[in-house]
């Protein structure tokens, strides 16, 4: 299930940090505080984890601002309306947000205070065998390098990219349903009709942890696969760190009703190292 949050700033022009993703997450978590004991999420997943673990089952987009400009490490906008999307494969997590009467509540990003103006349900696409997607937040994948004792983020043109997208999504399915999908077919191809994917290096901080940087990619792509996996990709996102604001995408119409296959064909190879995180 996917929701759209529309926010109104209480002052103009407003300023927010360039790296704001962790601040969105903190707001989302805060709204769950009054209802944590009423969240029967364990009925929808295979194991009874602590409530904070359930926030790994969400995904959210970047903020949509009107013609923002960059000034001294901040994004500045002169229009008071902004919006973002949040989604989860666990419908009850999103449904509870709709029952909290959040419209009119404060939503702070850095030093700027917003008011929640509207929350609406977003209709999913028809999950056909093939969808054309465009990122709403960067896609990120990494592999763990033993010699570095840390993850290395993959480039969009890495020959293992498609393999890790598929493996990551199947692992999410197994985590959520405690079983393998009936149909494991999935194919990911970048589309170059709008140019090569754009790099994003984002500085984040987890709760009670130090800052760290995450590399991701914004662009257009084609996704082929089973209805089960395509729906999960829509609800939970593609790639890693979805709960930190990575991997959300939107379905877009095919150009002239045809997929432009000449733009790119992803070569899928079996990697020597495994992708990390989800």
Image: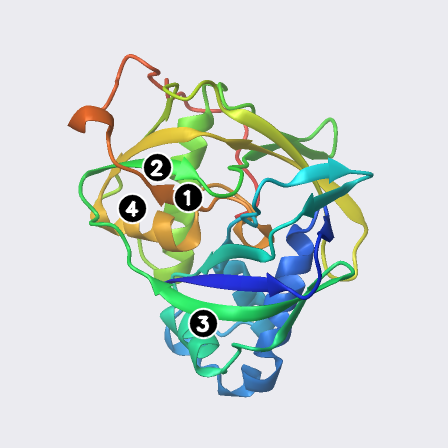
Furthest toward the top, the residue is 262
Where residue 96 sits, quadrant-wise, is: bottom left
Cα distance between the residues tagged 2 and 3? 24 Å
The numbered mark at residue 133 is 2
Q: Is residue 180 left or right of residue 52?
A: left
* Image position, residue 13 (x, y; %): 71, 52
Q: Mark 4 vs mark 3: which is more N-terminal?
A: 3
Frontmost of labels 2 and 3 is 2
Cα distance between the residues tagged 2 and 1? 6 Å
Do the numbered discs 2 and 1 sit on residues whose CB atoms are within 8 Å?
yes
For label 3, the SS is helix
Disc 1 target residue: 249
Q: Mark 2 vs mark 3: which is more N-terminal?
A: 3
- Tell me if mark 4 has few (under 14), some (14-19) or many (20+) residues whose alpha carbon lies within 10 angstroms of its own: many
- Tell me if mark 1 has few (under 14), some (14-19) or many (20+) residues whose alpha carbon lies within 10 angstroms of its own: many
Could one spot residue 161 in this view of the protein?
Answer: yes
């Amino acid at each position: 299930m996917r929701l759209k949050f529309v926010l109104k700033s209480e002052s103009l022009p407003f300023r927010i940090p360039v790296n704001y993703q962790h601040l969105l997450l903190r707001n989302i978590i805060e709204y769950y505080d009054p209802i944590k004991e009423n969240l029967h999420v364990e009925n929808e997943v295979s194991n009874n984890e602590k409530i904070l673990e359930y926030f790994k089952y969400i995904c959210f987009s970047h903020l949509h601002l009107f013609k923002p400009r960059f000034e001294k490490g901040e994004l500045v906008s002169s229009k008071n309306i902004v919006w973002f999307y949040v989604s989860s494969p666990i419908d009850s997590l999103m449904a509870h947000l709709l029952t909290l009467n959040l419209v009119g509540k404060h939503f702070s990003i850095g030093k700027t205070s917003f008011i929640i103006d509207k929350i609406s349900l977003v209709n999913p696409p028809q999950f056909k065998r093939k969808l054309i997607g465009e990122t709403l937040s960067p896609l990120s994948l990494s592999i763990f390098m033993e010699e570095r004792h840390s993850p290395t983020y993959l480039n969009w043109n890495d020959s293992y990219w498609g393999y890790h997208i598929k493996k990551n999504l199947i692992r999410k399915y197994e985590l959520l349903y405690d079983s393998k999908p009936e149909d494991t077919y999935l194919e990911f191809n970048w589309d170059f009709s709008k140019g090569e994917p754009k790099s994003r290096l984002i500085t984040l901080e987890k709760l009670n942890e130090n800052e760290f940087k995450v590399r991701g990619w914004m662009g257009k792509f084609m996704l082929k696969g089973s209805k089960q996996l395509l729906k999960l990709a829509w609800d939970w996102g593609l790639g890693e760190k979805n709960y930190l604001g990575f991997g959300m995408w939107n379905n877009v119409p095919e150009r002239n009703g045809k997929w432009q296959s000449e733009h790119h064909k992803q070569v899928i190879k079996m990697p020597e190292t495994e992708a990390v995180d989800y």
